[in-house]
Image (tube, grey):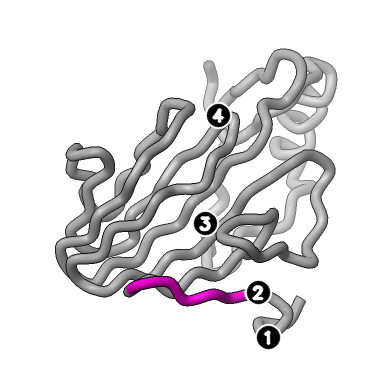
């Protein structure tokens, strides 16, 4: 999708880009397999903004002086939010990414950089990594070996 296809809305000191999902009265054309929310917020100093509701929601502070319901969130940190109403406040110009959506059904297995609902797929991913069947990460020149544990 080109940038101009991503819906944008301005609200009282907030520039909002809804990359995936629907929030703040706009809906992204980007589709996902499950109900997903991915939103970019650029807030002016001294701006308060109610966060959209989602079964699961987290806010990553890219930059700025931000608190959510009175709890400060440092730049470079992710705040995993409890379900319910929440308001974000920016004391300075701030850049925040929201990610969330509906809970996924079933168990998720996390091992190193891999996440799957299937142990078999996880083992295949390990084997593929060991065997060099993954593309290199852009900008990286060193291969990172699979951990022993």
Q: Nearer the viewer, mark 2 or mark 3?
A: 2
Other residues around mark 4 within 10 Å, as few (<14) / some (14–19) / many (≥20): few
- Which residue is tagged 1? 4
Alpha-carbon distance for marks 4 and 2?
35 Å
Q: Nearer the viewer, residue 128 or 104?
A: 104
User: Under tag 4, what secondary structure?
Assistant: loop
Q: Is residue 64 left or right of residue 16?
A: left
Does the magenta stretch mainly form a helix, a strand or a loop?
A: strand
- Label 3 to label 1: alpha-carbon separation: 36 Å
Instruction: Report how many numbered discs are placed on residues in the image.
Output: 4
Q: Is residue 14 left or right of residue 44?
A: right
As measured in the structure, the alpha-carbon distance from the residue carrying label 2 to the one carrying label 3 is: 38 Å
Tell me: residue 120, above or below residue 37. Answer: above
- Residue toward you, 128 or 24: 24
- Which residue is drawn at the image coordinates 79% and 39% (left, top)? 34
- The stretch in magenta equals 8-12
Residue positioned 75% across, 15% down in the render:
106
Decide: is 91 above or below 35.
below
Judged from the image, the secondary structure of the residue bearing numbered disc 2 is loop
Local packing at callout 3 (Cα closer than 10 Å; few below 14, some 14-19, many 20+) is few
Quadrant the N terminus occupies = bottom right
| Earlier sequence position, callout 3 versus callout 1 | 1
- Say whether residue 11 is magenta: yes
Mark 3 and mark 4: Cα distance apart in space: 17 Å
User: Relative to 59, is 65 on the left or the right?
Assistant: left
Q: Which residue is mark 2?
A: 7
Tell me the mark number nearer the camera, choosing from 4 and 1. 1
């Amino acid at each position: 999708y080109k940038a101009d296809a991503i819906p944008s809305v301005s609200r009282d000191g907030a520039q909002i880009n809804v990359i995936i999902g629907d929030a703040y009265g706009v809906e992204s054309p980007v589709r996902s397999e499950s109900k997903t929310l991915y939103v970019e917020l650029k807030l002016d100093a001294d701006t308060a903004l109610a966060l959209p509701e989602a079964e699961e929601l987290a806010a990553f502070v890219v930059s700025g002086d931000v608190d959510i319901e009175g709890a400060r969130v440092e730049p470079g940190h992710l705040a995993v939010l409890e379900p319910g109403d929440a308001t974000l406040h920016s004391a300075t110009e701030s850049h925040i990414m929201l990610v969330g959506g509906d809970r996924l059904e079933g168990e998720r297995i996390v091992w190193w950089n891999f996440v799957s609902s299937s142990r078999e797929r996880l083992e295949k991913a390990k084997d593929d990594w060991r065997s060099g069947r993954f593309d290199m990460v852009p900008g990286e020149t060193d291969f990172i070996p699979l951990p022993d544990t």
